[in-house]
């Protein structure tokens, strides 16, 4: 994985970067006579339709965590790709669903606000689920969006063609999509077609990021997300949705390695025991998995230390929301 450049940009577009001056690994910036384009594309969809898997496929490397657990993505994250001289900035938003709790409301608000920075809205629908209640609610809301929209029907390898065509027909009858794509984010089928179309249709203008940058998320945040993914993958059924990871310490040592300390917060003592596991077996396994991936990400040795703490009602703490890049919603 190319090392991402840390950034604290949230909720606004960064200052433009000059493609002529920027160079990246295996990437050629467009020449002075080439048409330069840059655009923001918001990925919108219900939980578990494959948005995080898709953004990783679009970027060409992992920038978003993937889990079978619903509502894994909590705040909008940006992944960046260069296609034919166009810089495509993909906004991976939380899944849109009927919110029941304060955290739910904050995530859904973050998802729709991700549209504010977007030039194009890419609506993702799970072919297996079709136009269910959540998909229909999103289509209803799109009437008020007022920007270019494309339809991405995902997991097409799992559904027969007649059913796919009916989903496309029904969705296009509800919203004015500029283009419809049949894709599989998991296998990559159709993803290149999406990127080529976007490269041709994003606005003309300078790039906003360096040519070798793949995300605008700070390394501390990415490391915390990696650990949260490993936590969910290992404790998918046992661990409740209300858990979070924060990177407390990030220290580069003289020998070239990095010491990272993270805290996993849960809401009850019984959850802390689940995360620790018998004799600390579970937390050690989570730490080993996370350490390997973080080391690959920063391209250097990592010493990862995990702590598990109980913080009751953390999901009602405004400070925790700010740490996740979310706005704390009013009652």
Image: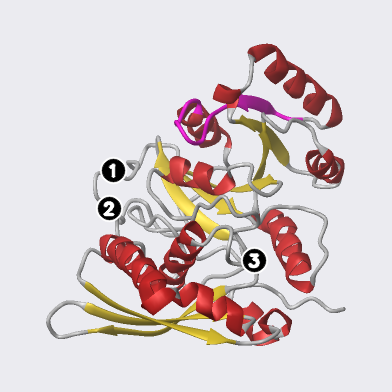
Give the CA distance from mark 2 to mark 3.
Answer: 41 Å
Give the CA distance from mark 1 to mark 3.
Answer: 42 Å
Counting from the top left corner in percent of width and height, residue 248 is at 43, 86
Assign a secondary structure to mark 2: loop
Give the CA distance from mark 2 to mark 1.
Answer: 6 Å
The residue wearing badge 1 is 28
In the image, which is nearer the foreground, mark 2 or mark 3? 3
Residue 214 occupies which quadrant of the picture? bottom left
Counting from the top left corner in percent of width and height, residue 272 is at 54, 80
Assign a secondary structure to mark 1: loop
Residue at the (37%, 48%) spot, across then down: 61
Counting from the top left corner in percent of width and height, residue 108 is at 75, 60
Is mark 2 in CB contact (under 8 Å) with mark 1?
A: yes
Q: Nearer the viewer, residue 43 or 233?
A: 233
Q: Residues within 10 Å of mark 2 (few under 14, many from 20)?
A: some
Q: Earlier in the sequence, mark 2 or mark 1?
A: 2
> Which labelled disc corresponds to residue 241?
3
Is mark 1 in CB contact (under 8 Å) with mark 3?
A: no
Q: Is residue 246 above or below residue 169?
A: below
Residue at the (80%, 44%) spot, across then down: 134
> Which labelled disc corresponds to residue 23?
2
Q: Is residue 244 above or below residue 173?
A: below
Q: Which residues are magenta?
A: 177-190
């Amino acid at each position: 994985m190319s090392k991402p450049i840390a950034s604290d940009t949230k909720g606004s577009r960064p200052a433009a970067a000059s493609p002529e001056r920027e160079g990246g690994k295996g990437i050629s910036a467009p020449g002075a006579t080439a048409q330069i384009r840059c655009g923001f594309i918001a990925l919108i969809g219900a939980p578990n339709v494959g948005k995080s898997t898709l953004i990783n496929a679009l970027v060409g490397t992992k920038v978003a965590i993937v889990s079978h657990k619903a509502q894994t993505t909590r705040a909008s994250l940006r992944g960046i790709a260069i296609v034919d001289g166009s810089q495509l900035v993909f906004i991976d938003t939380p899944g849109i669903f009927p919110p029941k709790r304060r955290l739910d409301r904050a995530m859904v608000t973050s998802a729709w606000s991700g549209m504010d920075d977007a030039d194009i809205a890419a609506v993702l629908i799970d072919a297996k689920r079709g136009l269910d209640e959540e998909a229909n609610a999103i289509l209803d809301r799109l009437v008020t969006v007022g920007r270019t929209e494309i339809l991405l029907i995902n997991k097409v390898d799992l559904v027969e063609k007649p059913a796919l065509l009916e989903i496309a027909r029904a969705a296009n009858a509800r919203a004015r999509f500029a283009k419809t794509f049949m894709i599989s984010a998991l296998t990559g089928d159709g993803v290149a077609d999406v990127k080529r179309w976007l490269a041709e249709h994003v606005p003309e203008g300078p790039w906003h990021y360096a040519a070798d940058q793949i995300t605008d998320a700070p390394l501390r945040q990415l490391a915390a997300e990696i650990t949260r993914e490993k936590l969910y993958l290992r404790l998918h059924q046992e661990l409740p949705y209300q858990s979070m990871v924060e990177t407390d310490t990030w220290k580069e040592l003289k020998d070239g390695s990095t010491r990272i300390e993270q805290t996993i917060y849960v809401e009850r003592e019984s959850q802390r025991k689940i995360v620790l596991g018998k004799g600390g077996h579970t937390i050690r396994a989570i730490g080993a998995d996370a350490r390997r991936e973080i080391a690959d990400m920063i391209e250097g040795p990592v010493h990862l230390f995990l702590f598990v703490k109980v913080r009751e009602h953390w999901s009602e703490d405004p400070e925790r929301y700010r740490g996740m890049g979310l706005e704390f919603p009013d009652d």
